[in-house]
């Protein structure tokens, strides 16, 4: 199902209508309120998480579920607040879309039901394979989905019997710490312990390095760019890496072109292109490329000229230590704001900037996280597959395709080998938003877990009873 701007506005209105008054977490960070789980010193934070885990682990699953239900309820209550504070603090994203992301996390993130058991019974007794907690998990969070990641990770990690030391992005620390406070209040209100999720007031790389090496932290989960994923994978501990992507979307001549155009633009512009799974460039076969561009223009795209493309390159990148890096003041900004920066005034109906270019154009080659969508024209689907694989840079993260030819879809799926492959839908269908399945904002492409949930935050344990309990 394609979601257009009107659908999104209707859903946002219905969420807002059903929201009860924001709970006592509504006071923004930085005020006089003590935030539960937020410490001055990282050693104190880890010790508190360790103590809380000792209480969580022996609890009946039903009790963990009670805490999780309360986290879900409070997330819905505070979705608008987190969305507004997230946009305010980071300067990135779209409040309406962020409300939807929080609603999705609250309603569809798996809890304890995701845990499963394997059993073998026979003459020599009964053996169970169970999924048990690691203990204290260290979780690094990005600036792009800050509270969405804190809440989604909290639900899965706590459902598995762990507690979490969060390392929020410094540029999203206040809103992230407010979400941590909410998770703890949800626990305390349900009769559970405080400090099931913790962090420090001032997150820094030094603090993260202490967590990475700490003897009381058993598993590391990093959601962010390549630097932090490499750091956790070099820590010597078991680590899960949810790293960068640059998802291409391939369109062949058999696709429903008007629908493909609308789906691609809906996915690409969701939260101003911040989700790592969002369409970042298009590869279109020559036969339908003009028609695709025409239909994109009909659904709110601004077709940039060559001169405007050059100005965008000058604006969205900066040179740092002789290297081209993203200008953070452009990441997650709307198409209207990005066009203003190059002297082009457009109305609110413009939600994406499109242009045709070579695959080596930096706006196509690099992961931008902005509603700028370059289109690479190719002769046929085979050339398209080769170009799309190149543009994905071996991240094995996400790729998308619009086609009605199952052979083409299969060929691309095998060649691109990504954790996510969406066909004939916007990219966000992969997160269960207008698609089947559960959401997560931690997609472990680098380490292979894919879309993470409770089961991924567990250790496998074999539990054996000798010569008994087989009643066959
Ligand atoms: P970022 O890499 O700048 O920061 C992510 C986190 O890592 C932050 O908390 C930051 O403080 C920390 N960090 C960065 N480098 C570090 C290092 N060397 N050692 C320790 N900590 C370090 O990323 P961002 O801009 O906040 O997020 C965007 C990036 O994250 C994009 O590349 C996006 O694709 C990726 N991302 C991936 C997923 C996924 O599920 N795979 C989800 C969200 C974002």
Image (tube, rainbow, N blue to C red):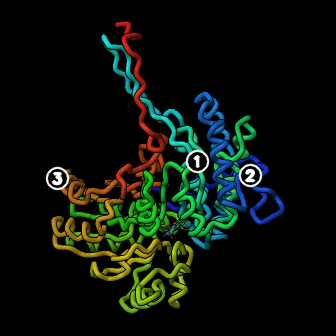
The residue that label 2 is drawn on is 36
Give residue 154's mark: 1
- Compared to residue 424, the image places residue 86 above or below, namely below
The residue that label 3 is drawn on is 407
Label 2 residue near ligand 1, CB within 8 Å: no
* Nearest to N terminus: mark 1 or mark 3: 1
Q: How many marks?
A: 3
Is there any visible trace of residue 133 in the rendered image? yes
* Nearest to N terminus: mark 3 or mark 2: 2
Give residue 363's mark: none
- Compared to residue 275, the image places residue 297 above or below, namely below
How far apart in space, not on screen, are marks 1 and 3 (Cα)?
Answer: 40 Å
Q: Secondary structure at mark 3?
A: helix
Q: Is residue 379 left or right of residue 316?
A: left
Residue extending farthest front: 215
Residue drawn where x is 52% and y is 59% of the image: 212
Q: Secondary structure at mark 2?
A: loop
How far apart in space, not on screen, are marks 3 and 2 (Cα)?
Answer: 54 Å
């Amino acid at each position: 199902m394609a979601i257009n701007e009107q659908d999104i506005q209707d859903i946002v209105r219905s969420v807002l209508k059903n929201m009860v008054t924001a709970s006592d977490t509504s006071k923004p960070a930085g005020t006089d309120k003590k935030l539960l789980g937020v410490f001055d010193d990282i050693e104190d934070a880890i010790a508190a998480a360790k103590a809380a885990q000792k209480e969580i682990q022996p609890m009946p699953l039903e009790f963990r579920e009670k805490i999780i239900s309360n986290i879900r309820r409070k997330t819905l209550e505070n979705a608008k607040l987190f969305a507004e504070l997230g946009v305010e603090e980071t300067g990135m994203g779209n409040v309406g879309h962020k409300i939807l992301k929080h609603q999705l996390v609250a309603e569809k993130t798996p809890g304890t039901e995701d845990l499963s058991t394997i059993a073998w019974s026979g003459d020599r007794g009964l053996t169970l394979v169970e999924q048990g907690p690691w203990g204290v998990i260290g979780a690094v969070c990005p600036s792009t989905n800050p509270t969405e990641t804190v809440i989604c990770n909290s639900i899965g990690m706590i459902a598995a019997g762990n507690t979490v030391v969060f390392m929020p992005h410094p540029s999203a620390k206040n809103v992230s710490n407010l979400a941590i406070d909410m998770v703890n209040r949800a626990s305390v209100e349900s009769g559970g312990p405080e400090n099931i999720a913790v962090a420090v007031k001032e997150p820094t790389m030094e603090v993260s390095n202490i967590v990475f090496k700490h003897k009381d932290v058993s598993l590391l989960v990093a959601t962010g760019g390549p630097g932090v994923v490499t750091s956790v994978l070099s820590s010597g501990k078991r680590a899960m890496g949810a790293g960068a992507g640059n998802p291409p979307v391939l369109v062949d001549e058999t696709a429903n072109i008007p629908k493909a155009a609308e789906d691609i633009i809906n996915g690409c512009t969701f939260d101003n292109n911040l989700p790592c799974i969002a369409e970042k460039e298009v590869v279109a076969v020559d036969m339908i490329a003009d028609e695709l561009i025409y239909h994109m223009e009909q659904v709110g795209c601004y077709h940039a000229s060559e001169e405007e493309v050059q100005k965008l390159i000058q604006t969205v990148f900066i040179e740092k230590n002789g290297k081209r890096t993203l200008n953070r003041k452009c990441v997650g900004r709307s198409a209207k704001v990005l066009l203003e920066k190059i002297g082009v005034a457009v109305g609110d109906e413009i939600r994406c900037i499109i242009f045709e270019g070579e695959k080596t154009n930096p706006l196509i080659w690099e992961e931008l996280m902005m509603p700028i969508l370059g289109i690479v024209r190719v002769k046929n689907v085979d050339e398209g597959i080769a170009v799309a694989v190149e543009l994905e840079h071996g991240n094995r993260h996400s790729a998308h395709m619009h086609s009605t030819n199952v052979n083409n879809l299969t060929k691309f799926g095998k060649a691109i080998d990504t954790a996510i492959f969406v066909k004939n839908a916007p990219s966000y269908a992969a997160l269960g938003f207008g698609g089947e399945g559960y959401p997560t904002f931690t997609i472990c492409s680098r380490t292979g877990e894919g879309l993470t949930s409770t089961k991924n935050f567990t250790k496998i344990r074999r539990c054996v009873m000798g010569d008994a309990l087989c009643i066959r």
